[in-house]
Image (cartoon, rainbow, N blue to C red):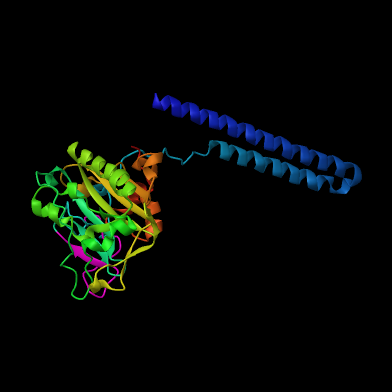
């Protein structure tokens, strides 16, 4: 059946080309004939010269028309083959971290564990990895891997506390610094408590204040919470997820008003302020839970990205899926380079996708 369709299409195109060539030839002949007639009556001495040139011209037009109509096409049908990383040469851009680790697909901001990198300080923990910002006092991003292997019976710890692994001399945010009664923002987890219930220690680590950002109650408790639950449902259905999330911009809205920052309450942090983001973003790479993730990543891999306003009332117009965007859009806003270890042929396709719930 496919050969018949191809033959019909080829024949149809050939007929169109022949008609086009015939029309062009007739127009050329008409011009030549008119010119010859005029010269015959008004300049007989040039008639023989023009006649020979006209015959030569018409002959060349006929030859060109024949060559064009019989010239084979070089067009090939578009390929629909799924491209995987195993099919491609990656020029050394392969994961440097172990499979299932937080930074398996890359380090989006090039964070380093160097005290001089105060606005992009790399902190690697067994439960998640982050880039921390000592100026904003919140993380730039947090990344983690999620599967059913992270689930267990551990209860929610609620032990919000400063992160003692911050470099000496840096201010470590404490629970009271968020001053909810005055500013109205939740201490919003970036890596969720419910994503780490395998052990009590795993759950407790999610309550470090370095894993918090100021979130409006409607964002944190409704829209963001629903998205987190959706991700865990995917894991329960046999998926594994690579997750990256973080804040963007300045100026969030709580029930108490709109604020750019929250002044630190502690005397140790006098003069410092916690940035209140205007939006919260998240990127999720979704795969079947199996091994050899790098070889399996492909242009068909599912990817989810959202860009959610950090303000009250956002749940009234719908759920988190109203804030779906592409990874390209988040990269353009943040300046980060996500999925850097995925071959470009696959990365470009994935980062342009918008998830369909």
Write the start and end of the magenta stretch as one range.
Answer: 104-125
Name the side, left or right, on which 178 lies relative to 124.
Answer: right
Q: Is residue 75 above or below residue 271?
A: above
Tell me if I can see residue 307 in this picture.
yes
Q: Position of residue 253 (x, y in %)?
A: 38, 54
Name the residue furthest right.
42
Between residue 269 and residue 344, name the one nearer to us.
Answer: 269
Which residue is rendered at x = 19% and y = 69% of the image? 166
Indicate the quadrant where residue 60 lies: top right
Name the side, left or right, on which 234 lies relative to 276.
Answer: left
Tell me if I can see residue 298 in this picture.
no
Name the side, left or right, on which 162 lies relative to 39.
Answer: left
Name the residue furthest front.
181
Q: Position of residue 264 (x, y in %)?
A: 28, 67
Q: Position of residue 105 (x, y in %)?
A: 25, 55
Is residue 30 inside the magenta stretch?
A: no
């Amino acid at each position: 059946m496919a050969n018949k369709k191809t033959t019909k299409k080829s024949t149809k195109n050939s007929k169109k080309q022949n008609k086009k060539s015939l029309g062009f030839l007739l127009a050329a002949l008409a011009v030549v004939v008119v010119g010859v007639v005029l010269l015959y009556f008004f300049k007989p001495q040039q008639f023989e010269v023009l006649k020979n040139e006209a015959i030569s011209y018409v002959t060349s037009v006929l030859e060109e028309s024949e060559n064009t109509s019989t010239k084979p096409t070089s067009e090939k049908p578009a390929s629909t083959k799924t491209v995987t990383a195993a099919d491609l040469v990656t020029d050394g851009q392969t994961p440097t971290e172990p499979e299932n680790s937080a930074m398996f697909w890359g380090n989006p901001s090039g964070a380093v564990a160097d005290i001089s990198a105060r606005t992009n300080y790399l902190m690697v923990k067994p439960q998640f990895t982050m880039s921390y910002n000592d100026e904003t006092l919140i993380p730039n991003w947090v990344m983690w891997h999620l599967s059913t292997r992270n689930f267990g019976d551990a209860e929610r710890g609620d032990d919000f506390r400063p992160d003692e692994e911050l470099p000496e001399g840096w201010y470590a945010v404490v629970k009271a610094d968020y001053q909810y009664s005055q500013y109205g923002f939740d201490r919003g987890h970036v890596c969720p408590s419910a994503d780490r219930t395998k052990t009590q220690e795993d759950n407790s680590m999610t309550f470090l204040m370095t894993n918090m950002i100021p979130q409006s109650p409607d964002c944190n408790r409704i829209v963001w919470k629903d998205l987190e639950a959706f991700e865990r449902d995917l894991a329960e259905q046999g998926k594994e997820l690579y997750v990256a999330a973080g804040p963007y911009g300045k100026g969030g809205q709580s029930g108490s008003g709109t604020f750019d920052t929250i002044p630190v309450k502690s005397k140790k942090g006098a003069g410092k302020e916690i940035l209140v983001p205007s939006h919260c973003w998240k990127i999720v790479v979704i795969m079947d839970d199996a091994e050899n993730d790098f070889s399996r990543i492909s242009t068909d891999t599912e990817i989810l990205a959202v860009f959610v306003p950090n303000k009250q009332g956002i749940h009234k117009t719908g759920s988190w899926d109203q804030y779906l965007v592409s990874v390209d859009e988040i990269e353009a806003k943040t300046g980060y380079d996500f999925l850097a270890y995925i071959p470009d042929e696959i990365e470009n396709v994935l980062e342009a996708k918008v998830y369909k719930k």
